[in-house]
Amino acid sequence: MIMAYVVRTKSKISLAAASAGRTVLSKKRQELRSLPSWSTLSSSVNSDAAKESSKTISDLPGPISLPIIGAAWTFFAGAKGQPLGKRILAVQEEHANKYGRIFRSRLPGVTIVSLSDPADVAKVLRSESKYPERLQFPVLDYYREKRQKIPGVFFLDGPEWYKHRSILSKRMLRPKEVADYASGFNQIITDFIHRLRTVREPSGSEKENEVCDLDKELFKWSFESVAEMLFDKRFGCLESEVNKEAQTFIKAVGDFLHSAIGVGFLPTWFYKIYETQQFKTFFSSFDTMYEYAELFIERRIHDLEEQQRNQSSNPSKPSERDKAGFFEFLLSSGKLTKDDLLASVIDVLFAGVDTTSNTMQWILYMMAKNPDKQDILRQEVLSVLGDTTLATPTTLTQMPYLKAWVRETLRLYPVLCIIARKPTEDITLNGYLIPRGTQIQFLTHVMGRDEKLFEDAEAFRPERWLRKKDAIPTDTAEAFSSIPFGFGTRMCIGRRIAELELHLLLARIVQQFEISYPPDAENVEPFVRGVTIPDRAVRAKFVDRQ
Ligand code: HEM
């Protein structure tokens, strides 16, 4: 019965469909409400799971598995020249439509269970252990093994992960601590806006007011923000002449991110026999990242020692800062070794740069494509800030539409099209016993565009997040239908920082520019390259507001 309602039908968007969508939505909610209560749900986790379920993972529907390649053929069959980055999303949708809200795919070396019903997602996430696990990335393990490096907060598991996480979260998740980054982020935004004006195409030219390499410019903004937070130092990425060290470092971070996911498609044993060009780039860029991160860390430690010496030789001299920087804080915890620090700094760079910069591209794309909504956004921002006042964490609380803008963008364009978990206990999902250690993935992209979960799902409507007080959904279906930052103790540790960066930049862009889309520009679609990026350049025009 339950399976029946999740078999998807793709409906086209029209005014008529909008009202029909409402009916479907409320029906869906009723059905979700009639699902077992939480107490019943949690009783089916762990040892009781086996008693309750008669069906096993082998009984799950899913694509046919061929010898050696398993279900990997589905990415290529029927692709009709579609690149893999798009095919990944198309296959997710096709499979969810065909097999329903829970299905399994056997890929070489791993069986994956995919979920796209928020109730199942909630059940997995709410029954997590103290040390939730995500997924393995064997090629990174291979690198670390060869280079004798240890993983950081993103890739660690178990008590070691917890050690890193509990220290980092004090500076990355506590609202008061995060608010302290606002003034530094605002200075970076000032430089970024100046740079946009410098690099945009001149008046009278064919692409007047367009910023041609918007992705690269946003990458610099995002890198500068995260690196400043980590190292308490400006890297100068937004200057016309970027210093050589910073340039080498950010190029390495970019190359690493671009190659990391691609190399993950082949098993590690393959690289032991033959190193592809992409694999070589991955290794060399990772080497450079470590080399430079180590250099910056050494320098920072040296500066701190110097400051300490000056302080003890002249105690009457006030210290330069009244609050320890991010780095001093991590060091002073006494729990992280220098190698631990290096590992987590690398992981934060891995997770914190491409994510925010790509989200900002989608945010701008939504501005360009929705001029009427952009007007509403502008009215809100100007009513709180006027033309020139810089936004702060306090004034941002008065801008619910701006926050909803980011949320709605992440619903349609979640940075990660899947979020992974490996339950540490057996769990029953929809009558199937899923053994502990199974690779489970939540289809965030599929859920975000599901007509049964979101009325008029393909339409950009920030208003949908304004309905509830403080926009915090309480209903399971709503709370777990769009979880762009994940959930629970393993959720994105940079969430508050990312939101602050995005909200501050969005407010400033709204104050400064009208964003429009050139009439001859093509529509942009999502493309998976690790994170979900635009499949072509976002051609936004940055026109000065009069
Ligand atoms: C729009 C921006 C961002 C999005 C959508 C995003 C999304 C995510 C998601 C979905 C996860 C996995 C969560 C889970 O498994 O439940 C994650 C993990 C993580 N993110 Fe973000 N992220 C963003 C920005 C950032 C930033 C700016 C930083 C750092 C400054 C960061 C650092 C991390 C780290 C370190 C983890 C691993 C946490 C752990 O395993 O304990 N992220 N992020």
Image (spheres, helix red, strand yellow):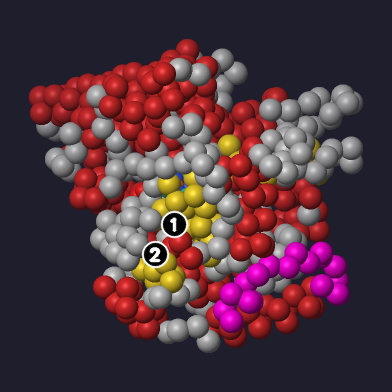
Residue depicted at x 66% and y 83%? 27
Against 154, is 17 above or below?
below
Residues at marks 2 and 1 touching, judged by CB atoms closer than 8 Å: yes
Against 294, is 469 above or below?
below
Residue depicted at x 33% and y 32%? 141
On the rendered image, what quadrant is the C terminus found in? top right
> Dividing the picture into quarters, in which one does residue 128 lie?
bottom left
Q: Residues within 10 Å of mark 2 (few under 14, many from 20)?
A: many
Question: Of residues 129 and 367, which is closer to you in this image?
Answer: 129
- Return the x and y of residue 356 as percentages of the image width and height: 54, 43
Q: Secondary structure at mark 2?
A: strand
- Return the x and y of residue 357 as percentages of the image width and height: 57, 39
Q: Is residue 115 left or right of residue 406?
A: left
Q: Is residue 84 left or right of residue 441?
A: right
Q: Residues within 10 Å of mark 1 (few under 14, many from 20)?
A: many
Against 139, is 467 above or below?
below
Which badge, 2 or 1, comes first in the chain's sequence? Answer: 2
The magenta stretch is 1-17
Camera sees residue 511? no
Q: Which residue is mark 1?
A: 440
Residue type indicated by callout 2 = Ile
Q: Which residue is mark 2?
A: 434
Q: Between marks 2 and 1, how big is the CA–CA gap?
A: 9 Å
Residue depicted at x 83% and y 40%? 522
Decide whether residue 10 is among the magenta residues: yes
- Return the x and y of residue 59 as percentages of the image width and height: 48, 65
> Dividing the picture into quarters, in which one does residue 190 lie?
top right
Camera sees residue 3? yes
- Return the x and y of residue 47 as percentages of the image width and height: 26, 73
Question: Of residues 439 and 140, which is closer to you in this image?
Answer: 439
Residue type indicated by callout 1 = Ile
On the rendered image, what quadrant is the N terminus found in? bottom right
